[in-house]
C-alpha cells in the first residue's frame, strides 16, 4: 500500500498539545514529552534546517502547530508537478526541522494511501486505510456523495479503480 507524504504540513499543524518541549539543552537540542504516550525523546534541529527553524513566522498563525514545524514560502517550493501540494494554497512545502531525530509517532504516521488533487494540483482530499474517504473541499464532498452509492460491493483494487475513474472523469488527479 503506497503512502507518500507530500509535505502539506496538515498533520503537524495540530500537534502542539502532543509534543511539549520540557527542556532546552542548548545547541538546538530539546527534550520533548509526548502527552499521549508519556514518551520522552531528545530531538535536535537538523543541521541544514537551523535557519528555517530560527524563523517561526510561518507558523505564527498556527497556534496549535508542533514547535518544530516550519513552512517554506510558496516561491521557494517546487511547482505542484514536482510534488509539492500546499494544503491551503498559501504556504509552501512543510518541513519537520527535527526530521532526523523526530519522535517515533512521527516516523510511523502516514495520512493517506490515495491522494486527490484538484486540476490546479492542490490537495482536495485523501483516502485513508481501506476506504475512508476524507474530502478537504465541499465540492469534492458533494461529488463523493454521488459516487459512494456506486461502490457498493467493491473492495480492494476494484474499489480503488472505480473511485479513481470517477474522480478523474470529474477533473481530479489521484496519486497512489
Ligand atoms: S503525513 Fe499527510 S498530512 Fe502530514 S504532511 Fe504528509 S501528506 Fe500532509
Ligand atoms: S516533530 Fe516533526 S514530524 Fe513530528 S509533529 Fe513535529 S514537525 Fe511534525
Image (tube, rainbow, N blue to C red):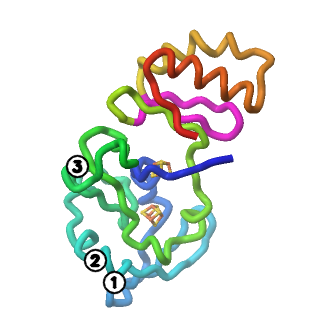
- Which residue is outermost to the right? 153
Q: Residue at x 28, y 38 (%)?
A: 89
Residue receiving disc 3: 74
Answer yes or no: disc 1 within 8 Å of ligand 2: no
Residue receiving disc 2: 50
In front of the other: label 1 or label 3?
3
Q: Earlier in the sequence, mark 1 or mark 3?
A: 1
Mark 2 lies on a secondary structure that is helix
Locate residue 23, reporting x and y percent.
41, 83
Q: Residue at x 42, y 59 (%)?
A: 16
* Image position of 134 (left or right of 64): right
Locate residue 46, reporting x and y percent.
38, 78
10 Å crowding of disc 1: few (<14), some (14-19), many (20+): some
Q: Are marks 1 and 2 in contact (CB under 8 Å)?
A: yes
Q: Residue at x 37, y 26 (%)?
A: 119
Residue 174 higher or lower than 29, as above or below? above
Q: Is residue 122 magenta?
A: no
Q: Residue at x 40, y 28 (%)?
A: 118
Amino acid at each position: 500500500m503506497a503512502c507518500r507524504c507530500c509535505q502539506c504540513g496538515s498533520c503537524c499543524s495540530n500537534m502542539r498539545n502532543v509534543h511539549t518541549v520540557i527542556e532546552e539543552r542548548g545547541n538546538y537540542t530539546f527534550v520533548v514529552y509526548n502527552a499521549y504516550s508519556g514518551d520522552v525523546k531528545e530531538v535536535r534541529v537538523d543541521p541544514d534546517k537551523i535557519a528555517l527553524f530560527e524563523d517561526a513566522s510561518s507558523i505564527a498563525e498556527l497556534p496549535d502547530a508542533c514547535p518544530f514545524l516550519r513552512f517554506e514560502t510558496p516561491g521557494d517550493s517546487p511547482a505542484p508537478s514536482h510534488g509539492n501540494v500546499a494544503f491551503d494554497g498559501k504556504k509552501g512545502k512543510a518541513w519537520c526541522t527535527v526530521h532526523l531525530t523526530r519522535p517515533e509517532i512521527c516516523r510511523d504516521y502516514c495520512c493517506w494511501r490515495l491522494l486527490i488533487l484538484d486540476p490546479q494540483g492542490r490537495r482536495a482530499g485523501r483516502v485513508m486505510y481501506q476506504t475512508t474517504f476524507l474530502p478537504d473541499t465541499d465540492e469534492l464532498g458533494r461529488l463523493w456523495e454521488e459516487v459512494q452509492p456506486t461502490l457498493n460491493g467493491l473492495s480492494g483494487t476494484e474499489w480503488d479503480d472505480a473511485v479513481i475513474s470517477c474522480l478523474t472523469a470529474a477533473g481530479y488527479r489521484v496519486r497512489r
